[in-house]
Image: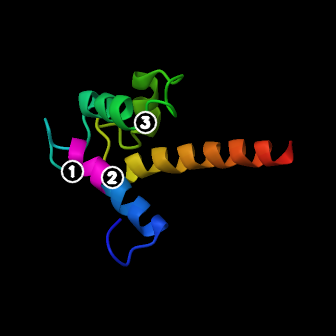
Amino acid sequence: MAEGQSEVEQAIVTLVSCFYKHAGEEGQRETLTSEEFNKLLNEELPQLTQDVPLEDRLKELDLNKDSELNFKEYWRLIGELAKAKQKDLKDKKKK
């Protein structure tokens, strides 16, 4: 962890860095193509996205329908995954 950064701050840096690690490998530097998106999910989120058809997921997230994901669209995915994880943790706590 970078000196002086909290766990949450470091998590945000990691999420942003992950997007830019995969964006621009092909296509535009600021977006994820379908192949880049699939690679990101397979490498970075394999446990959280294993039951999701990847092409369907891309279409749901692609608000401007340009067949790529910009950072805002990627962030929607992160928010949805965080909500699902929060629900899981809340349900486990009730038991």
**Color theme of the render:** rainbow
Amino acid type of the residue tagged 1 in the rendering: Glu
Amino acid type of the residue tagged 2 in the rendering: Phe
Residue 71 location in percent, x, y? Answer: 33, 52
> Going 43% across and 52% down the picture, which residue do you hit?
75
Q: Quadrant of residue 81?
A: top right
Out of 84 and 47, give the one closest to the viewer.
47
Residue 46 location in percent, x, y? Answer: 44, 30
| Looking at the image, residue 58 lies above or below residue 76 | above
Residue 94 location in percent, x, y? Answer: 85, 47
Q: Which residue is mark 2?
A: 71
Left or right: residue 65 compared with residue 35:
right
Q: Quadrant of residue 65?
A: top left
Q: Is residue 13 magenta?
A: no
Q: Which comes before the other along the chain, label 3 or label 1?
A: 1
Spatial CA distance of label 2 from label 3 is 16 Å
Q: Which comes before the other along the chain, label 2 or label 3?
A: 3
Out of 57 and 18, give the one closest to the viewer.
18
Q: Which residue is mark 1?
A: 30
Query: Which quarter of the figure is the C terminus placed in?
Result: top right
Out of 34 and 1, give the one closest to the viewer.
1
Left or right: residue 88 compared with residue 9:
right
Q: Which comes before the other along the chain, label 2 or label 1?
A: 1
Left or right: residue 78 compared with residue 34:
right
Query: Which quarter of the figure is the N terminus placed in?
Result: bottom left
Task: Give the magenta range.
Answer: 17-22
Tell us which disc is closer to us: 2 or 3.
3
